[in-house]
Image (tube, rainbow, N blue to C red):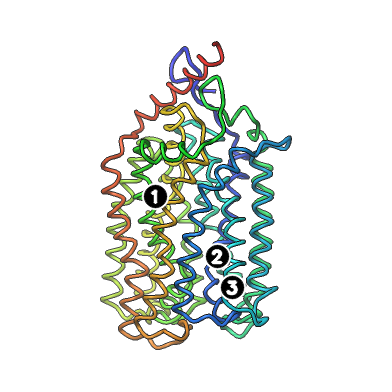
């Protein structure tokens, strides 16, 4: 236990193995994220839904996803069992999401069903995933409030969020896809669903083990003598009066639009399968960047520990903008198809991608720790420990805004001619494909990061202020205990 002064105990720290196991939520989150990235293909192949309608459905389900976050915050507040709060929510949410996903991609797919069944199963998945994800977002604040250790928590969350999709890309695109003819079809989608659901189960089990020491009623209390159940006005109060949360919402929502659009399967296919011309090589190059990106995350965590999470977000966001402008210029000046051949362009592409991904890893690491800071700021401001309200309120706005990411991606490919079908590896590398890929992959991200810089100018939650926040929380808790 560390102290900020000689009178009040302020900081508590988690053990490293507990942090690592808790961060294994990345196995669940990213396995599901990877699988749901194939939802457009499942809708088209398994349910006969056209490209433009798919975009509309994805937008609707994203808005539905947003609404469930604050609603399920009431569930988080009221769940208190002899097995804790976090573990029952994680396991129950996993069961719901897994049934929805397996039915959507396998059990009901290609059985003659149409839009209603696909939409219903997607909504079922959303409810389950929201329960798991909402609960997982509260874990960094629950496990440690040490400003030096919080960025370390962010590193491990970021590492798994990066490693798992990389491993799944190898497994799905280089191992499984060739076995099913090299194109997305029903057989491939069914196997992919079982693989991703199995990996997600492993992640949830690890989280439950890692958080067991902290999953106790006394760790979910505010600074007052009495504890009240969550009310709707608490959400309105948080959104209106928590200024750092307002800045974070603007920053994260704008970034999320770009992140989800650029990670859509159709965008990856246009970049790696059409412009560069080798899906397998694209996966290989991504794997090459794995260790350097993790090294960036570790360095970024140390920077955040020294300068504060807010300052780290601003610094690395600026670097991300410059790096992405550079890679767009690189694609303009070269023939992208030459990247698939061993030579100078391949080396330059790898280096530029390493830098872009590395800077983005630093931003993500700071983001994870900064959300925990916002939760503690609210505890200091209002006296209430309501992490699910913070994350739920953020997710509501974030998902409503970013709900248009899938529509942006599908509308973009429709604008360049893909109205009745989706891009496939080996399609012609037209000028339209090139510029739409550059915009969806890199241009949207630049716009999102500009919004981040503007939003963070109004946020005062510096490293020094967070030290003051933790001191005030500790003093208020001590006073409540002695009253």
Quarter holding the N terminus is: top right
- Mark-to-mark CA distance, 3 and 2: 23 Å
User: What residue is pinned by disc 3?
Assistant: 116
User: What residue is pinned by disc 2?
Assistant: 34
**View extreme (right): residue:** 82
Please identify, in this view, whether the residue under mark 3 or under mark 1 is nearer the observer: 3
Q: Position of residue 208 (x, y in %)?
A: 67, 44
Q: Earlier in the sequence, mark 2 or mark 1?
A: 2
From the viewer's perspective, is residue 271 above or below residue 363?
Answer: below
Q: In terms of depth relative to the viewer, which is nearer, 380 or 467?
A: 380
- Mark-to-mark CA distance, 2 and 1: 21 Å
Residue 181 quadrant: bottom right
Classify residue 174 as left or right of residue 345: right
Classify residue 225 as left or right of residue 84: left
Q: Residues within 10 Å of mark 2 (few under 14, many from 20)?
A: many
From the viewer's perspective, is residue 46 above or below residue 21?
Answer: below
Quarter holding the C terminus is: top right
Classify residue 79 as left or right of residue 404: right
* Tally of marks: 3
User: What residue is pinned by disc 1?
Assistant: 363
Q: Position of residue 224 (x, y in %)?
A: 52, 21
């Amino acid at each position: 236990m560390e102290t900020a002064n000689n009178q009040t105990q302020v900081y508590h720290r988690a053990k490293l193995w507990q942090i690592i196991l808790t961060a294994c939520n990345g196995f669940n989150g990213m396995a599901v994220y990877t699988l749901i990235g194939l939802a457009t293909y499942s809708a088209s192949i398994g349910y006969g839904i056209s490209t433009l309608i798919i975009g509309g459905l994805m937008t609707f389900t994203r808005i539905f996803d947003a609404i469930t976050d604050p609603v399920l915050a009431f569930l988080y507040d009221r769940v208190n069992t002899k097995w804790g709060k976090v573990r029952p929510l994680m396991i129950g949410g996993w069961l719901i999401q897994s049934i929805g996903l397996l039915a959507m991609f396998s059990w009901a797919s290609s059985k003659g069903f149409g839009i209603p069944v696909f939409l219903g199963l997607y909504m079922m998945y959303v409810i389950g995933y929201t329960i798991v994800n909402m609960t997982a977002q509260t874990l960094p604040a629950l496990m440690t409030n040490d400003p030096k250790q919080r960025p370390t928590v962010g590193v491990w969350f970021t590492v798994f969020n990066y490693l798992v999709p990389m491993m799944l890309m190898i497994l799905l695109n280089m191992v499984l896809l060739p076995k099913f003819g090299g194109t997305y079809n029903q057989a491939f989608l069914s196997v992919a669903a079982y693989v991703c659901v199995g990996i997600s189960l492993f992640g949830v089990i690890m989280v439950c083990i890692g958080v067991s020491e902290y999953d106790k009623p006394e760790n979910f209390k505010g600074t007052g003598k009495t504890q009240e159940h969550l009310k709707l006005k608490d959400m309105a109060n948080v959104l209106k009066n928590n200024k750092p949360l307002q800045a974070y919402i603007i920053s994260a929502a704008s970034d999320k639009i770009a992140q989800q659009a650029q990670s859509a399967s159709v965008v990856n296919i246009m970049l790696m399968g059409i412009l560069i011309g080798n899906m397998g090589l694209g996966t290989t190059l991504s794997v090459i960047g794995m260790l350097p990106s993790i090294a960036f995350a570790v360095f970024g965590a140390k920077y955040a520990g020294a300068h504060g999470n807010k300052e780290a977000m601003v610094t690395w966001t600026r670097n991300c903008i410059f790096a992405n402008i550079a890679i767009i210029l690189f694609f303009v000046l070269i023939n992208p198809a030459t990247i698939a051949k061993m030579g100078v362009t391949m080396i330059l592409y790898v280096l530029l991608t390493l830098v872009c991904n590395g800077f983005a890893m630093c931003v993500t690491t700071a983001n994870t720790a900064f959300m925990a800071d916002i939760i503690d700021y609210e505890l200091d401001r209002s006296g209430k420990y309501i992490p699910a309200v913070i994350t739920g309120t953020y997710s509501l706005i974030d998902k409503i805004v970013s709900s248009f990411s899938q529509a942006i991606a599908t509308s973009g490919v429709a604008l360049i001619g893909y109205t009745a079908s989706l891009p496939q590896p080996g399609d012609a590398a037209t000028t339209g494909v090139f510029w739409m890929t550059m915009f969806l992959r890199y241009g949207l991200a630049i716009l999102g990061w500009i919004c981040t810089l503007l939003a963070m100018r109004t946020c005062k939650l510096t490293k020094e202020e967070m030290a003051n926040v933790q001191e005030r929380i500790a003093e208020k808790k001590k006073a409540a205990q002695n009253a």
